[in-house]
Image: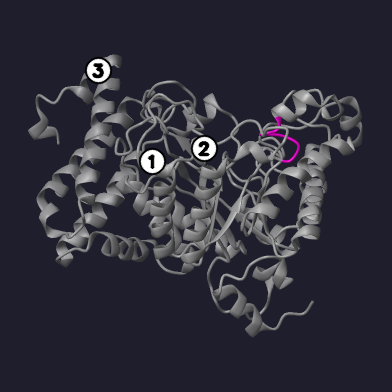
Amino acid sequence: MHIRRRDFLKLSSAGGLGMAAGLRNEQAAPGISNREYNYRIAFDVWINDVRNESMPLENWPYGVLDDRTVDGIIRALDAQAASGYNIIDPIGFWSTYGWPVDIKSAADKDRIRRINQILKAAHDRKIKVITFPSGIMNWGLDEIIKQNPAVQSDNKHIMNPLREESWQWGYRIFDYVMDNYDFDGFHLESADQGRCRTNECMEKWPDSVAYHCYVTGRMAEHIRQKKPSALLIATIQNFSTWGQGLNEAQKAYLVDLSKKVDCLVDQGHRGTYIPPSEQPSFIKSLHCAYGTSGGIWVYPPQRWDRNRWFLPYTARCGKHIADLYNAGGRGIMYYQGPVVNAGTEVNIAFGGRIMKKPDRSIDDVLSDTLEALYRPKNQAAHRKLIGVFQTAEASYFDQWNEQEILGQDKRGIPGELHLTNLFGASPGPATYLMEPYLNTAGRLKYKEGLVSSLRILQDVEAQFDDRDRIGRIKEGISEALVDLNNIAKAKGEKEVWDDSNVGRRF
């Protein structure tokens, strides 16, 4: 199908993405002048990751869908709509670990009502909604696998894709979503729990990239046949080994998969499979858009109070997003979090704005973001607030001991940063302030940056009409300082925790 340039621009500006447009490799089309990302995806992840209250005694992921879940998602939608996102991607609407065998009992009438409330809220804000009802051949299928020997593989969490019964169960789940809800498409993911490794599967697909491209592509074909307009975003995390990249044959498998989806997302949990130097040529070979998760992100700690941290990362994300755009990338799956956290709110708002205008300078986008949210009463206060965000970011990330990080985990420097342990039954320790990320010198430098930022905020707080956002920044910094001092005290790092000469040192 040939699409005229003006029709493409109309579709893009209206958020008209997906197979209905007959459009695949939009980013390669010559003469297109609207320099923005086409797939500006707000990745809410699990439905309670944007919840604005903590769940201190609940293991992750918290699967309850109640009114507070809805409130968190809608408050995030307000921030996302205001800053330019055109897609949201929440996970966990029906099942956290296991769909029931009858499928439909996964959602009672109250859950259905809340799902529809979220869909309406997004569509009212001109934002499309995709979702991940289950993995492809894994994740969310445990009960079905347990009760159906015909689909079982070598792993109790994974179906055997060489059994037609496995596909019929997978289709049943995706069909249930398409038949009963107004979702705009799907987040396709096959590799989070690994792959089938029976002898017959290993013989047919000795290469894991080939395996995952096959199962992802087959589900995409089924969805396309049933709902041609569906927007399909396929993530390739865990398709291969982190840090090893992909060979030419594996890239060819991805090129073939790109004929069946709208965007391939090479998320970058431990660096992208396609290194930056290879991205321009690889992207040109695709039949769809290529994207990442923005280079760096903080996964929100579910059991922590939502104002316990303050960690902007706009400079790092901004550089990655600008560089990827120039390489030909047109998709970002940008991780979200609770908007009540002041640093998270700015990270979200900045991400949406720079995806809309990746040619703008990072400083200008940050300046606009803070002006919109904090409404400074004068330029001097505005400049000082910009400096607080820049200092808070640099004083943490510039202290990363990358040699120690790679020594502990040879997969690569993390794109996804966990501030504490993901799983647990109570609030965990602040591991992001410990080795291998920060050593003694790093903790001292970070503390100095936070103390300096806190002093500035105390001086200028009255110069903003910010609806207590600065109060929340101060709370986050104070909590981070408590964590730093507790860690240093336990380690005997007197130079970090002893403030007896605070006036001279800070």
| Mark 3 / mark 1, whichever is N-terminal | 1
Vertical placement of residue 80 versus 483, above or below = below
Question: Is the C terminus in the top left, top right, bottom left or bottom right quadrant?
Answer: top left
Q: Residue at x 46, y 37 (%)?
A: 417
Q: Residue at x 47, y 34 (%)?
A: 402
The residue type indicated by label 3 comes to Lys
Decide if residue 150 is on the left or right side of residue 70.
right
Indicate the secondary structure of the residue bearing disc 1.
helix
Q: Residues within 10 Å of mark 1 (few under 14, many from 20)?
A: some
Q: Residues within 10 Å of mark 3 (few under 14, many from 20)?
A: some
Q: Residues within 10 Å of mark 2 (few under 14, many from 20)?
A: some
Depth order, front residue of 126/478? 126
Depth order, front residue of 395/258? 258
Give how far apart the Cα atoms at labels 1 and 2 are. 12 Å
Q: Which residue has dot 2 on it?
A: 414
Q: Residue at x 29, y 51 (%)?
A: 389
Question: Is the N terminus in the top left, top right, bottom left or bottom right quadrant?
Answer: bottom right
Q: Magenta residues, as a range?
A: 136-141
Give the quarter of the image for residue 201. top right
Q: Which residue has dot 3 on it?
A: 489
Vertical placement of residue 294 versus 370, above or below = above
Indicate the secondary structure of the residue bearing disc 2.
loop
Give the quarter of the image for residue 144. top right
Which numbered circle lies on residue 397?
1
Are the residues at dot 3 and dot 1 in contact (C-beta closer than 8 Å)? no
Give how far apart the Cα atoms at labels 3 and 1 are. 22 Å
